[in-house]
Image: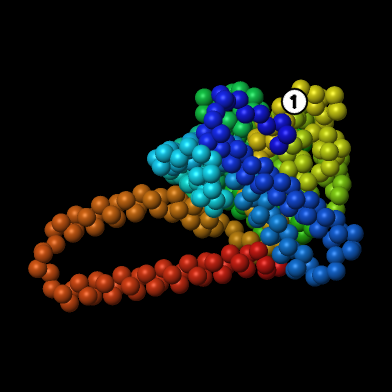
Amino acid sequence: MASFDFKQPKLKSSEAFPFVFVRDHWETKESVRDSCENALNNLNAAWHNGSWPLSQQEYRYNVSILERTISILTTDIIVLHTSFYEICGRIMDCTTWGENEDTQHWSHLTLSYLDSLITLYKTPQGARRALFTKRDKKTRDWFRADVIEAYDALNAGGGVWCVITGRHFYPSLVKAAQIVRYKVGEVTAAHLFGPPDSRDGHLGGAKNAFPVFGYYEKLLDDGRLVIVPDTEAGPNCWKTMWLHDEDAERPSHGLAEPTGKRLHNRPLKFKNDFRPAARYLYFAYCMRVLRRQRHEAPGWWKGRFSTSSGWASPRDYMRTSTLRMLARRVGHLTEDEALAFSGESAADIAGVNEHAESVHSDIVSQGSMKTLIPCHWRKNFDNLEFGTDSEDENEDEDEDEDEDEDEDEDEDEDEDEDEDEDEDEDEDEDEEEDEEEDGEEEEEEEEEEEEEDEGYYTDD
């Protein structure tokens, strides 16, 4: 973090300590993250050149551990950057109450205390960034309605058009597939793409999504299916493309919805002239390629771009300096490869604020990657189900959980006020037993979820 420069007034040694303490911890986290990224690069290189002596399962397990560590460290670094002075102020306030003026009185502070502050700023109460917050259900419903209206996707019978299949479905089966993930954040999106065209910003505008059957939204989110220009059909035309060759060679199983070979190079069909923004589609494509490159042989990404010559220069779509940093951060490319990926030259780097680009690339890498482990490691194509809304329902339940809890608490308070003070002891004992049973059931469910999470990172 050599380019980091604090601009602050001269302070006494005791007042300056929080800044030095937090800055050193920040630099340590960046150093550890760099070491983990180097270890991941070496691990992938050893696996692809055949020098890895262990099994495939052990290789994938080690990759998952490194990926998770990098993700946690990157999130901490983002918090330290965006809330640096707030965290320093909290530390200074703690010691001011004790009227400590000498730096020797700071010795009781530990890294655990600082990490606890970082965790505090990750929570919804402390966070002011989209990276750590979710959209409420009403906002998502409005966004979906705007997308359906913009694409003229709703017919007289109530069906909603899917641009991939080219037919209408029952409304609950069609999703507004967001191109640039909401967790990227509007500030970072403006840094990437420039001023937004819509009053809803980059992320909330209808050009950042298109209506698709729920099954295809899952494929797009997993990074298996991508949208690329259809140059043969003409300008502003698009088609689907499998990112994995094995998916493109699979049969379609005779299903009504196109899959496998039928889905590869399939033109998108729109009801009107409204189209998604090319810059968002290009960004999403780059992120999918970089995600896959993390676990492929060096140089794999070059084949993906040579076979998709429909993309123009990256300069036409987004800020190339950030794209170069993303190539380093997400795809683990070398400096020369990152320059080629972003379309930059060595002369273009002069005058670039590397620190700002690094911070935005950290936010993008965290907010845009839905999963850490490649999806083809976790499940086979045949296991995907059509027309299931379980994931969206679970998200709705999670996002509305706080509201439901508040309502339940209010109801409980009203019931408590109406209860008779002379309530029988037997009824109280029964309630306590029920609560204990509910608590045991919740603990069992949590243990089962933890076991599932462990299996997610270890199973083939």
Counting from the top left corner in percent of width and height, residue 222 is at: 66, 52
Counting from the top left corner in percent of width and height, residue 316 is at: 75, 26
Q: How is the image coloured?
A: rainbow
For the point 80% across and 24% down, the residue is: 350
| Lateral position of residue 265 relative to residue 452, left or right | right
Determine the secondary structure under disc 1: loop
Give the total of numbered labels: 1
Can residue 268 be seen at all in this image of the molecule?
no
Which is more toward the observer, 159 or 114? 114
Counting from the top left corner in percent of width and height, residue 101 is at: 48, 37
**Label 1 environment density (alpha carbons within 10 Å; few <14, some 14–19, many ≥20):** few
User: For the N terminus, which image quadrant?
Assistant: top right
Q: In which quarter of the image is residue 416?
A: bottom left
Give the residue type at disc 1. Answer: Val
Residue topped by disc 1: 352
Q: Is residue 441 above or below residue 151?
A: below
User: For the C terminus, which image quadrant?
Assistant: bottom right
Counting from the top left corner in percent of width and height, residue 12 is at: 54, 30
Q: Quadrant of residue 239?
A: top right
For the point 38% across and 50% down, the residue is: 402
Can residue 420 be seen at all in this image of the molecule?
yes
| Lateral position of residue 282 relative to residue 386, left or right | right
Q: Quadrant of residue 412?
A: bottom left
Which is more toward the observer, 392 or 334? 334
Which is more toward the observer, 257 or 385? 385
For the point 51% across and 70% down, the residue is: 448
| Lateral position of residue 143 relative to residue 190, left or right | left
Which is more toward the observer, 450 or 460? 450
Q: In this view, does 11 lie above or below 131?
A: above
Q: In this view, does 287 lie above or below 339?
A: below
